[in-house]
Image (spheres, grey):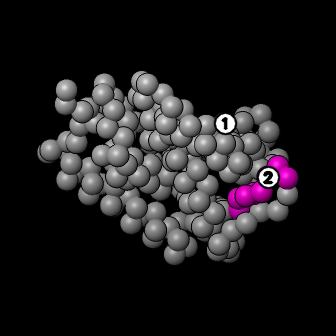
């Protein structure tokens, strides 16, 4: 995905917000953490460009290992289910959900090593043919970019619909 991760993170977070009503946790914080979780796996792009000099596919870095996100999700769910103060645990769970969904979305047209580090074999649903230069035109002109545009439009719709009457995650006393 090129533009779809942040809007997808917003959508998922907005839809999960009613299920994570925690006293003292604002909707704004919840949404920001969700979007950050959706973008977090791509922080490896800094390493990819500035340290690794683009020598390895950035999806082979640990930040794109689904096992990392599954482990974080499992730990945060356990934390959420056992914590007295659930605010930070709810945020960790949301962050992990969106990080894992980043892997699912990347698998549509990008290789993801679902069984890394145990098996060195990528998986992808659809291949984007290399027809254009620069490389990113191949993704922008591929049908899958329509999915990203649809996600972005739906995120904007949700944002516009809820900004007049924002949902508050704080439970009344």
Residue 38 percent coordinates (x, y):
51, 46
Residue at image point 64% right, 74% down: 126
Specify start and end residues of the magenta stretch as a single range.
111-118
Q: Which mark is residue 116?
A: 2
Q: CA distance from mark 1 to mark 2?
A: 21 Å
- Given residues 66 and 158, the one toward you in this image is 66
- Magenta stretch secondary structure, dominant: loop
Name the residue rendered at 47%, 41% in the picture.
Answer: 94
Which residue is denoted by mark 1 in the rendering? 46
Q: In the image, which is nearer the foreground, mark 1 or mark 2? A: 2
In the rendered structure, does residue 113 fall within the stretch colored magenta?
yes
Instruction: Identify the disc placed on residue 4.
Output: none
Residue 56, placed above or below residue 26: below
Picture coordinates of residue 18 (x, y %)?
30, 46
Left or right of 23, for residue 105? right
Determine the secondary structure under disc 1: helix
Q: Does the rendering let one see residue 17?
A: yes
Residue 45: image location, x then y, percent: 66, 42
Q: Position of residue 48 (x, y in %)?
A: 73, 41
Q: Magenta span has 19?
A: no
Can residue 36 be seen in the rendering of this structure?
no
Front residue of 142 and 158: 158
* Farthest left residue in view: 164
Q: Residues within 10 Å of mark 2 (few under 14, many from 20)?
A: some
């Amino acid at each position: 995905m090129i533009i779809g991760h942040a809007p997808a993170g917003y959508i998922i977070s907005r839809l999960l917000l009613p299920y994570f009503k925690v006293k003292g946790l604002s909707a704004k914080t919840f949404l920001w953490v969700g979007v950050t979780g959706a973008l977090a796996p791509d922080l490896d792009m800094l390493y990819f460009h500035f340290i690794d000099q683009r020598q390895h596919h950035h999806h082979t870095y640990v930040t794109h290992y689904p096992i990392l996100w599954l482990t974080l999700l499992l730990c945060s769910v356990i934390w959420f289910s056992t914590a007295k103060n659930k605010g930070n645990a709810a945020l960790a769970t949301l962050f992990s959900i969106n990080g894992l969904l980043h892997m699912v979305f990347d698998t549509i047209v990008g290789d993801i090593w679902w069984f890394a580090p145990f098996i060195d074999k990528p998986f992808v649903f659809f291949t984007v043919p290399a027809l254009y230069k620069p490389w990113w035109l191949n993704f922008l002109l591929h049908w899958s970019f329509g999915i990203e545009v649809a996600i972005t439009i739906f995120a904007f719709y949700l944002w516009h619909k809820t900004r007049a009457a924002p949902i508050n995650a704080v439970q009344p006393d």
